């Protein structure tokens, strides 16, 4: 919903899922990074002339102290978006809760490490957590689409969730290059029109390509 606004990203490392197409393996499959305390993170954020801050991951709700971090960022006058797969609940402080429930297209295959498939499948959807977030926060639901049949799965999930505003459902194509995204865009846009969903571009890929630190 806020695509195009300059934002500071606070990215945590570590994830309880293993998506087949994960575009940040350095936060999930092979987590890396450096430890910083709350004061150091807040000081780093202040270096950027941006009101919008996105707390993301990996899975940021796994991080200890994320509630205090979002509270302090909010108290500093920032607009806070928290990006989560919505598999676990924590009472964070934020203006927009961006949930990205994982579809079946995310299940890792044997080549990627078959031992993760069962774990991922068991954890990827937590409908009670999603409902709790919907009740308590201004929210959006973002689904990463790989194939046409993904739309049927999305409709099933929405039906199980109950009342969800369809204009809050964002559809993002899976891909890591402008070319691969462009190939999917036409049919995804048509299905978004028919379904009443929003199409969500991967703007950072269009602008900078698939590289870190942008």
Image (spheres, grey):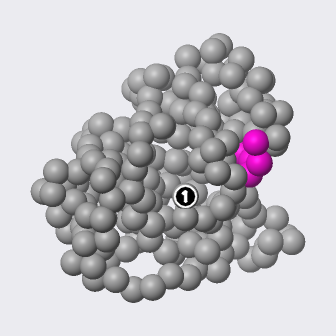
Q: Is mark 1 on a helix, strand or loop?
A: loop
Q: Residue 146 colored magenta?
A: no
For the point 67% across and 42% down, the residue is 206
The spot of residue 72 in percent (x, y) is 17, 63
For the point 21% across and 78% down, the residue is 39
Residue density around tag 1, few if under 14, some if 14–19, many if 20 or more, within 10 Å: few
Q: Which residue lies furthest to the top in this view?
A: 194
- In the visual, does 210 lie left or right of 1? right
* Above/below status of 99 relative to 155: below
The spot of residue 12 in percent (x, y) is 44, 71
> Which corner quadrant of the image does residue 147 belong to?
top right
- In the visual, does 82 lie left or right of 105? left
For the point 19% across and 54% down, the residue is 74
> Which residue is labeled 1 in the image?
214
Q: Between 117 and 48, which is closer to the camera in this rendering?
A: 48
Q: Between 74 and 156, which is closer to the camera in this rendering?
A: 74
* Above/below status of 186 relative to 202: above
For the point 66% across and 36% down, the residue is 153
The spot of residue 91 in percent (x, y) is 24, 58
The reply to whether residue 144 is visible in this rendering is no
Q: What stretch is highlighted in magenta?
A: 174-178
- In the visual, does 23 lie left or right of 86? right
- In the visual, does 200 lie left or right of 99? right
* Above/below status of 132 relative to 68: above
Q: Which residue lies furthest to the bottom in this view?
A: 35
The reply to whether residue 213 is visible in this rendering is yes
Q: Residue 177 colored magenta?
A: yes
Image quadrant where one finds the C terminus: bottom right
């Amino acid at each position: 919903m806020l695509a195009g606004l300059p934002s500071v990203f606070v990215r945590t490392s570590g994830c309880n899922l293993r998506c087949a197409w994960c575009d940040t393996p350095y936060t999930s499959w092979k987590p890396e990074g450096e430890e910083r305390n709350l004061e150091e993170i807040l000081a780093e954020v202040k270096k950027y002339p941006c009101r919008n801050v996105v707390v993301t991951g990996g899975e940021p709700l796994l991080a200890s102290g994320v509630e205090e971090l979002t509270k302090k960022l909010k108290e500093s006058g920032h607009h806070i978006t928290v990006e989560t797969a919505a598999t676990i609940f924590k009472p964070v402080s934020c203006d927009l809760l961006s949930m990205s429930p994982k579809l079946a297209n995310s299940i890792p295959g044997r080549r990627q490490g078959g031992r993760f498939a069962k774990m991922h499948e068991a954890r990827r959807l937590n409908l009670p957590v999603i409902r709790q977030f919907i009740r308590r926060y201004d929210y959006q639901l973002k689904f990463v689409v790989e194939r046409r049949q993904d739309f049927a799965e999305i409709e099933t999930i929405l039906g199980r969730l109950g009342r969800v505003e369809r204009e809050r459902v964002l559809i993002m194509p899976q891909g890591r290059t402008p070319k691969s995204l462009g190939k999917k865009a036409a049919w995804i846009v048509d299905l978004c029109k028919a379904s009443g969903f929003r199409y969500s571009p991967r703007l950072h890929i269009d602008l900078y390509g698939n590289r870190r630190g942008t």
